Image (spheres, rainbow, N blue to C red):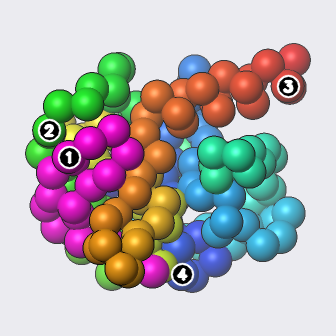
Amino acid sequence: MATVMIEGTDGGVLINWKDRPLIVTCDHCIRKKSVKVTYKDKYTEYLPCIFREKMNDVAIIQGNRKHGKMAELVEEYTNTSVTLVHHHPRPFSQSCGKTYKNFTHSCGSYWGSSGSPLYTKTGQVMGIHESWDDETCKRYLINCETLRNVLNDFEFTIK
């Protein structure tokens, strides 16, 4: 899987965005301009955070395609229930859940899961875990449509 650990506590996902390796995570996981990234093979390096979008809570880190498989975003986000696999970088375990509405999911995720990808059974990224409400136990995700929009904004700003 393309899951990475950010700063030793949160998650992220290495994606292939127009033949460019990028790591997508939640903006609230980023504390510095240079970010400690640990890949599944335990290789660790510091990479620059190259774009932050606070409104949608998304950050983009320059990725490294040498360490880990890159994932693709689902082509189209739907509001229908779809079985997902949540892949948290610590300790690289998996649990299953389903989406219920536009931005919620029920994968086993808690504090420290922010930025961790939600994969479809075919290995595509449906979104990333963003937060959970401890009063309602609802878990929220940033869906792939939002991620794609932020990635397009990033691409526009670097031209």
Residue placed under numbered mark 1 in the picture:
100
* Amino acid on which the number 4 mark rests in the picture: Thr
Along the line of sight, the residue nearer the viewer: 45 or 97:
97
Magenta stretch in the rendered image: 94-111
Please state the horizontal and vertical placement of residue 67, each as a whole percent of the image: 50, 55
Please state the horizontal and vertical placement of residue 88, each as a whole percent of the image: 35, 69
* Amino acid on which the number 1 mark rests in the picture: Tyr
Q: Tell me if 159 is positioned left or right of 97 in this view.
A: right
The question of residue 109 being in magenta is answered with yes
Q: Is residue 4 visible?
A: no
* Mark 3 burial class by Cα count in 10 Å: few <14, some 14-19, many 20+: few
Residue placed under numbered mark 3 in the picture:
157
Residue 9's disc number: 4
Q: What is the C-alpha distance between the residues marked 3 and 1?
A: 34 Å
Residue at horizontal 65%, vertical 32%?
A: 150
* Amino acid on which the number 3 mark rests in the picture: Thr
Of pointers 3 and 2, the one earlier in the residue sequence: 2
- The secondary element bearing badge 2 is classed as loop
Residue at horizontal 24%, vertical 71%?
A: 108
Q: What is the C-alpha distance between the residues marked 2 and 4?
A: 29 Å
Q: Nearer the viewer, mark 4 or mark 1?
A: 1
Q: What is the C-alpha distance between the residues marked 1 and 2?
A: 6 Å
Q: Nearer the viewer, mark 3 or mark 2?
A: 2
State the image quarter where residue 83 is shown: top left
Q: Tell me if 129 is positioned left or right of 120 in this view.
A: right
* Amino acid on which the number 2 mark rests in the picture: Ser
Residue placed under numbered mark 2 in the picture:
81
Residue 11's disc number: none
